[in-house]
């Protein structure tokens, strides 16, 4: 699903034009803000916009701090003011001022005149200043007496002037304050030498290159400017440019490719474990075999449960995973369906198992699906233990089954071979203990180990959507430890594990190796058979899942064939193929996969099934609208339509068919496809007439006459005229008369006259043959 650019711009609070330009810079073709982009591209645009805003915010905060810092900066000290005599010691808490040279002694002055109350009269004269000097100062302040000031300035004695410290030149104090002190170089610290070789990971930025080869950024930029290239410190350089810089500064650079997220995940899976971390784990045993041979019933007897009654029709629809205690040792059992439609599910069950139990009914023997199960087990390179079930039946023939197994290179152990064959009965419990003992022995011989100290790895067996818990996946943890709160990747799905529930319905905090559990918290339902892998970083887990989804979509698009001049005729012929469009909704992901495969197998060169949409969950309004627009049928397997969807389907007259057993779905679709097949047309000869007479009419033309030798002549039948064993006319009868009266049918031995449509070249001795075309309904093989 994509998102329109104007909606994304409104969400991010940025102009739509900016998003359009960013998309075009990355080669994404969008015409305007009404265009849409895939969700992974939209997520990249969101991250870029957020990163840009954060960078601008940091730059603004940094500029504000610099400005505030400049305001609080202490200004350069000014020249000290004229000192005033103060009585008494300096106040507490203040540092004593620096001592200045003492001024020359001032002449004694008379006591100041006092006014009313004995208060001294204010005077503008300083200590030691004469009345004449004070008057001159007042005149100068008013702008008067300038000439007098010039003439009398020299008359003032030096001892009458107040001493002031010498003034510094302007800016001298500031220059002294911010003057850079010369750095003292220590002789004992040697300067770092430039490396002669360096290794760096692609993509290479100018900053990273400068740090790797110990060359200043400015020197590298200057070197590139001389070659006509303008770069900044954060720009990425091509490999050719990096090698040019390395040659210019006499450094050998080895550029290694960065590992992709997929390579990192694969490396994590293939990293060998330390021997001291390995611990013994439980074996995983898979039950395989033909349908209705008693696999689930046998497992019920081992678990002392009743699972078969829960399956519709007593047939297993999904993969079941159970953990059982056998002689204080845990054994994990997988129960897989046995019908041929579940081939892919059986294959997944064999690929995750350590031991395969091949269940064969003693009264039925080896069947085609049994042979398939043997091939799956051999492809997985796992040992096989044969369980001869239903040994309690009167018509059981275990010797015949052993003979059939020998024909498939599975010689029983009691016949001198390597295959363990145990006779059991799920009804009476006969041989169950012997079977468990054999399985325990096989597990000990395999010496199965697991590492519980690393992130969990496992296989997704099933996935479905629950209204209460969201996406729920049935997972077999093969190795490591899965904890609540771990971040996991399951193919194109990712998320945080919110709940772990075992086969007994208990809510657990963590599970170890070889444990089947149900987990919730994944964003989308994973595909059955996907690998579950724990991740330390949630962000990298999401990125890897998005990469896988994008890769799957690209692969699906790459498989679409485009019409060329060479394939034009093939496509035109394929366009005539009749289609039955269906929308498939199932309870779990595995059922959707198996049903899709089974329905696609029904397709032929003339008719085919077109699955418009296959998903997990109930039938929704969008499914009904899609079916209405595409003239399709909605197939609901073990799910029910929503109330609104049901009402909408009645309004749109869309058919929703609900099923509980998978074979019924296949049979109904097969019948529908057979209805689309063109019926087989067969020709059936009705009668013959020998032409003995010809009657000519100016109005009607030539009318032939003769006797019906066999069969009958019917006016509605098609007719052909045969002359010398060649067909000279093939058409229809225009009129049929007997004894001058119109007739619909003439039987054997009677004479009649016949006029053919648009044909008059008739001769005596010709044979008129009538026939009909019968249409016979065809069946799919």
Image (cartoon, rainbow, N blue to C red):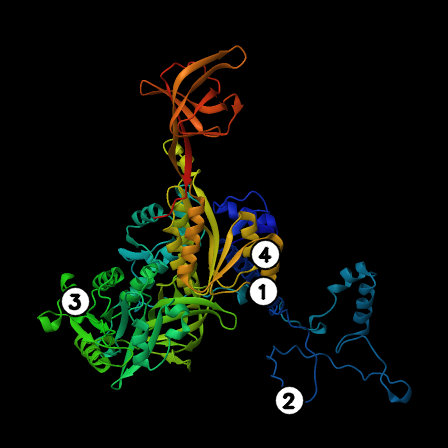
Observer-nearest of 541 and 207: 541
Observer-nearest of 664 and 125: 664
- The answer to whether any part of residue 579 appears in the image is yes
Q: Residue furthest left?
A: 416
Q: Residue at x 39, y 51 (%)?
A: 600
- Of badges 3 and 2, the one in the foreground is 3
Please tell me which of labels 3 and 2 falls first in the chain.
Answer: 2
Locate residue 340: give its quadrant. Answer: bottom left
Q: How far, Cα to Cα, is label 3 from label 4?
A: 55 Å
Q: Residue furthest top?
A: 698
Q: Do the numbered discs 3 and 2 sit on residues whose CB atoms are within 8 Å?
A: no
Locate residue 405: give its quadrant. Answer: bottom left
Q: How far, Cα to Cα, is label 1 from label 4?
A: 59 Å
Circle 4 packing at 10 Å, graded few (<14), some (14-19), many (20+), is many
In the rendered image, residue 226, in percent from the top left (x then y), is placed at: 40, 42
Please tell me which of labels 3 and 1 falls first in the chain.
Answer: 1
Please tell me which of labels 1 and 4 falls first in the chain.
Answer: 1
Q: How far, Cα to Cα, is label 3 from label 2?
A: 117 Å
Q: Residue at x 44, y 38 (%)?
A: 575
Q: Which secondary structure, mark 2?
A: loop
Please tell me which of labels 3 and 4 falls first in the chain.
Answer: 3
**Residue tagged 1:** 61
Circle 2 packing at 10 Å, graded few (<14), some (14-19), many (20+), is few
**Residue tagged 3:** 400
Q: How far, Cα to Cα, is label 4 from label 2?
A: 95 Å
**Residue tagged 4:** 649
Q: How far, Cα to Cα, is label 2 from label 1?
A: 41 Å
Q: Which secondary structure, mark 4?
A: helix
Q: How far, Cα to Cα, is label 3 from label 1?
A: 87 Å
Circle 1 packing at 10 Å, graded few (<14), some (14-19), many (20+), is few
**Residue tagged 2:** 92
């Amino acid at each position: 699903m994509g998102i329109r650019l104007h909606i994304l711009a409104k969400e991010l609070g940025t102009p739509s034009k900016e998003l359009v330009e960013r998309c075009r810079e990355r080669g994404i073709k969008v015409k305007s803000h009404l265009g849409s982009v895939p969700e992974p591209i939209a997520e990249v645009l969101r991250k870029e916009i957020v990163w840009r805003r954060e960078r601008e915010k940091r730059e603004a905060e940094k500029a504000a701090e610099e400005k505030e810092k400049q305001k609080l900066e202490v200004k350069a000290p000014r020249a000290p003011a004229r000192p005033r005599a103060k009585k008494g010691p300096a106040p507490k808490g203040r540092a004593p001022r620096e001592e200045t040279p003492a001024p020359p002694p001032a002449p004694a002055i008379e006591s100041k005149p006092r006014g009313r109350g004995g208060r001294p009269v204010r005077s503008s004269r300083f200590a030691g200043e004469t009345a004449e000097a004070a008057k001159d100062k007042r005149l100068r302040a008013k702008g008067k007496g300038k000439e007098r000031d010039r003439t009398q300035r020299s008359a003032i004695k030096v001892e009458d002037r107040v001493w002031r410290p010498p003034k510094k030149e302007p800016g001298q104090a500031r220059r002294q304050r911010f003057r850079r002190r010369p750095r003292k170089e220590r002789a004992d610290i040697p300067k770092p030498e430039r490396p002669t070789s360096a290794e760096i990971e692609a993509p290479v930025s100018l900053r990273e290159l400068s740090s790797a080869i110990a060359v200043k950024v400015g020197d590298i930029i200057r070197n590139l400017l001389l070659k006509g290239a303008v770069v900044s410190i954060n720009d990425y350089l091509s490999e050719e440019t990096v090698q040019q810089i390395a040659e210019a500064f006499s450094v050998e650079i080895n550029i290694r490719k960065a590992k992709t997220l997929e390579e990192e995940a694969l490396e994590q899976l293939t990293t060998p474990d330390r021997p001291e971390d390995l611990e013994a784990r439980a074996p995983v045993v898979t039950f395989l075999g033909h349908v209705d041979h008693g696999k689930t019933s046998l497992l019920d007897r081992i678990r002392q449960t009743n699972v078969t009654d829960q399956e519709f029709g007593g047939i297993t629809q999904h993969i079941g995973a159970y953990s059982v205690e056998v002689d204080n040792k845990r054994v994990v059992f997988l129960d897989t369906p046995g019908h041929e439609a579940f081939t892919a599910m059986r294959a997944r069950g064999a690929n995750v198992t350590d031991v395969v139990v091949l269940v064969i009914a003693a009264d039925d023997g080896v069947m085609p699906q049994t042979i398939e199960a043997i091939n799956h087990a051999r492809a997985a390179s796992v040992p096989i233990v044969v369980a001869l079930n239903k040994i309690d039946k009167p018509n059981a023939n275990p010797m015949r089954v052993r003979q059939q197994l020998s024909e498939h290179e599975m010689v029983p152990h009691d016949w001198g071979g390597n295959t363990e064959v145990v006779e059991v009965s799920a009804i009476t419990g006969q041989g169950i203990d012997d079977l468990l003992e054999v399985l325990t022995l096989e597990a000990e011989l395999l010496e199965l180990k697991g590492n519980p100290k690393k992130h969990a790895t496992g296989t997704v067996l099933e996935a479905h959507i629950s209204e209460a818990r969201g996406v729920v996946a049935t997972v077999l943890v093969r190795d490591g430890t899965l904890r609540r709160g771990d971040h996991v990747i399951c193919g194109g799905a990712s998320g945080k594990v919110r709940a772990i529930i075992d086969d007994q319905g208990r809510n657990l905090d963590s599970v170890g190796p070889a444990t089947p559990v149900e987990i919730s918290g994944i964003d989308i339902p994973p595909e059955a058979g996907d690998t579950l892998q724990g991740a330390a970083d949630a962000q990298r887990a999401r990125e890897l899942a998005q990469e896988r989804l994008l890769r799957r979509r690209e692969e699906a698009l790459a498989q679409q064939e485009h019409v060329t001049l060479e394939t034009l005729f093939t496509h035109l012929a394929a366009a005539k193929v009749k289609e039955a469009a269906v929308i498939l909704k199932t309870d779990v992901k595995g059922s959707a996969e198996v049903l899709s495969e089974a329905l696609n197998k029904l397709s032929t060169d003339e008719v085919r099934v077109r699955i418009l949409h296959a998903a997990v969950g109930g039938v929704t309004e969008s499914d009904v609208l899609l079916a209405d627009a595409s003239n399709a049928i909605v197939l609901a397997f073990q799910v029910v339509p929503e109330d609104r969807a049901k009402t909408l389907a009645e309004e749109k007259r869309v058919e929703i068919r609900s099923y509980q057993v998978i074979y019924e779905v296949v049979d109904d679709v097969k019948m529908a496809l057979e209805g689309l097949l063109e019926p087989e047309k067969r020709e059936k000869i009705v009668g013959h007439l020998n032409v003995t007479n010809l009657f000519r009419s100016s109005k009607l033309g030539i009318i032939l006459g003769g006797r019906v030798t066999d069969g009958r002549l019917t006016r509605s039948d098609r007719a052909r005229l045969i002359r010398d064993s060649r067909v000279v006319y093939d058409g229809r009868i225009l009129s049929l008369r007997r004894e001058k009266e119109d007739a619909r049918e003439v039987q054997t031995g009677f004479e009649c006259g016949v006029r053919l449509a648009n044909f008059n070249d008739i001769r005596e001795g010709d044979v008129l043959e009538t026939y009909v075309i019968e249409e016979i309904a065809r069946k799919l093989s």
